[in-house]
Amino acid sequence: MRISLGQRLRQVASFVPMGARLADIGSDHGYLTAWLLQNGRIELAIAGELNREPAERARQTARAAAVAGQMQVREGAGLTVLQPGEVDTVVIAGLGGTTIIEILQSNPAVLASVQRLILQPNVGGAQVRHWLADHSWQIVDEALVAENDIIYEIIVAEPGQMLPLTPLQAEIGPVLLQKRPPYFAPRIRSAIAERQHVVSQLANSTSDAAAAKRQRLVQEIEDLEALLT
């Protein structure tokens, strides 16, 4: 069986270095690792799953794609399925930002031996970026990709120091702010709409905290709108 990827995972795959030793944590059927192996892009693949059922699905994918000899499927929490130095690239895609951070923190010895992180948070991208900046990871690339009318963001990080991020850089992405790739404008409009919704909810509140939050959001809306001009 030849594996095919949607736009989201194909964009994730594009950031995997040729010849990488890859771990895909929360692999969701193992499609990404199987595709990379079938196309000769990586040397080794480990698919990590927390529970038995998704792990079995990944094993079925490996057998159907005829890559079972190169693709190991392991059950366990986060990076605990790995040994230090075993892989050089880690993908965590399709999870929330809080969960991604929990995975990154699950095995410090393993994380210290990793050379590239490819992260695709469904929500909480700002949390992930702040965590990377605070833990000696430098964001080296980012991308936006649309699939099923949803715009996904992908963050690529490597070991290195990065200046503390401004709220706008954390929310939108420092590289995306520079590159302004396709789907940048819709992503900005979505961020504006989210803040406008909260501002409208705060309109009737008379507390000092609500007023301060509303003022902050109004300023953020202005900063975001400036990116569209």
Image: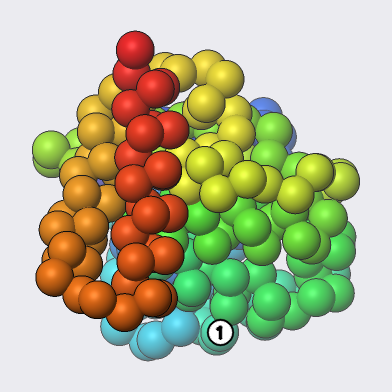
Task: Name which residue lies at 22% across and 57% down.
Answer: 199
Which one is in front, 108 or 89? 108
Task: Name which residue lies at 38% across and 75% down.
Answer: 208
Q: Is residue 100 visible from the viewing direction of this image?
A: yes
Task: Name which residue lies at 22% across and 61% down.
Answer: 198
Local SS, label 1: loop
Horizontally, residue 81 falls left or right of residue 100, namely right
| Image vertical order of residue 177 relative to residue 117, above or below | above
Q: What residue type is labelled 1?
A: Ala
Residue 54's x, y, as percent? 33, 76
| Image vertical order of residue 108 relative to residue 167, above or below | below
Q: Name the residue under label 1.
A: 77
Quadrant the N terminus occupies: top left
Kindly give the residue lying farthest to the top in the view shown: 229
The quarter holding residue 7 reads: top left
Which one is in front, 58 or 79? 79
Colour scheme shown: rainbow
